[in-house]
Image (tube, rainbow, N blue to C red):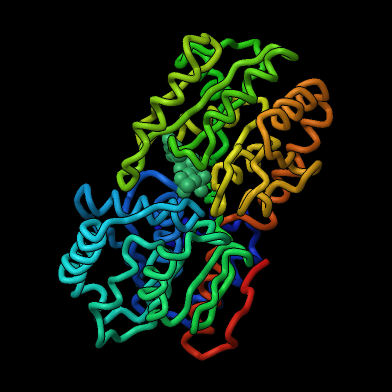
Amino acid sequence: MDNSKILESYARVAGEDVMEHLKQLAAHLRGLKVVHVNSTREGGGVAEILRKLIPLKRALGLDTHWEVITGGQEFYQCTKSFHNALQGDRVMVSDTLLQAYEDTNAANAERLKPVLQDADVVFIHDPQPAPLIHFFPKRKGSWLWRCHIATNRPYRPIWKYLRNWVTRYDASIFSLPEFAQPLPHPQYLVPPSIDPLSDKNIALPAKEVAAVFEQFKLDPVKPLILQVSRFDRFKDPLGVVEAYRLAKNMVPLQLVLAGGGASDDPEGEIVLNEVRLAAKDDPDIHILLLPPDAHRTINALQRAADLVLQKSTREGFGLTVTEAMWKGKPVIGGDTGGIRLQVVNHHTGFLVSTPEGAALRIRYLLHHRDKLAKMGRTAKAFVKEYFLITRHLKEYLALTIILRMGGPDRIEVGM
Ligand code: UDP
């Protein structure tokens, strides 16, 4: 699709005025080379966002690139521990793993030198590539550290180590105010977003939605509750199984836990086995291991579900919540991090802290279908207003302009 067609298609969903605004902002940045760096092209929210943000930036005429750093097993083991520690786990990381982390960044810096050295703006996503900046003492552009993780209560020793890299950046971006940290540079607040035109979120023919019942041997009649997530303890899949069991005593029910791995997440297999054990041989629990490109399947499952759960105990943002809300589903979500930004209690879903609470909310919604439908409509309107990619991009563009012109220390670019 050519660029003007791409922009037109977004105008149809987000509005002409929104696209006009984006074009005006982009005009100030034409000619700039912008690079995003993360650690996986598939799996997890960051890859999901970049996959759509980069082509849209390009369609607006910005010279935008997406680079991915790669490493060995020790590197991913180290960065997964960082992730867990930033979300509050007390984890120890050995010197050997730290060495692998730094060596991997050194090797990737060498490989990426031709792209990064002369870039005007560099977005480094999350801790995996954070040390890259150290290897560019003569960097030309502004470098931002974009953190997608719930850092409200980081485990101090690990944050102290990572902070040493982060302080070298020109600015950092967090998703929520409570994630911001004492840092010696400007901080910005930008929540993530979904792309309404991606395979994951586009409207689907009813036939394609109905087909998932046959494909995964689901009961076409029994109410269906769904959680889509990597198999990660912070997503609390065991809590979901418990909530399902409690709710099933009150209403007929089936549960789908759909997930796959992210190439930078080595713990998935262990958690998946724990979930299988907890599910035992309950024929109404369906654990689906989906390939990383199963976007339309996830889309169809989210549409087929009566309601969606995201019972995380920590959550940087939770794109799965946005995706479900965009499909008109109320979300029963863990009362934490980015879920709180999206689930407005009693309006777009319910916030819960225990499996018991989740079970009661499941029962309530399945017994009050009018309320369920109304909450779903409110949820969709809420996403349209605040969590589409066009809003996200507008804030990145505004932030880039501010950064290049100099701006106040700590501002909220968006909501
Ligand atoms: N996802 C997917 N396949 C899976 C599990 C998740 O495509 O098996 C997608 C999901 O639809 C969402 C993203 O990965 O777009 C997960 O983002 P989220 O912010 O919810 O969580 P993260 O994995 O980044 O912690």
Looking at the image, which residue sits at the far bottom? 406
Up/down of 102 relative to 266, above or below = below
User: At 58% across and 28% down in the image, what residue appears?
Assistant: 240
One can see residue 266 in this view: yes
User: At 47% across and 51% down in the image, what residue appears?
Assistant: 89
392 with respect to 268 (left or right): right
24 with respect to 95 (left or right): right
Towards the viewer: 3 or 360: 360
Up/down of 202 relative to 250, above or below = below
The image position of residue 296, as x and y in percent, is 46, 33
User: At 68% across and 51% down in the image, what residue appears?
Assistant: 340
Figure quadrant of residue 159: bottom left
142 with respect to 23 (left or right): left
The image position of residue 300, as x and y in percent, is 53, 29
Towards the viewer: 205 or 221: 221
The image position of residue 3, as x and y in percent, is 42, 61
Position of the C terminus, as image quadrant, is: bottom right
The image position of residue 26, as x and y in percent, is 49, 75
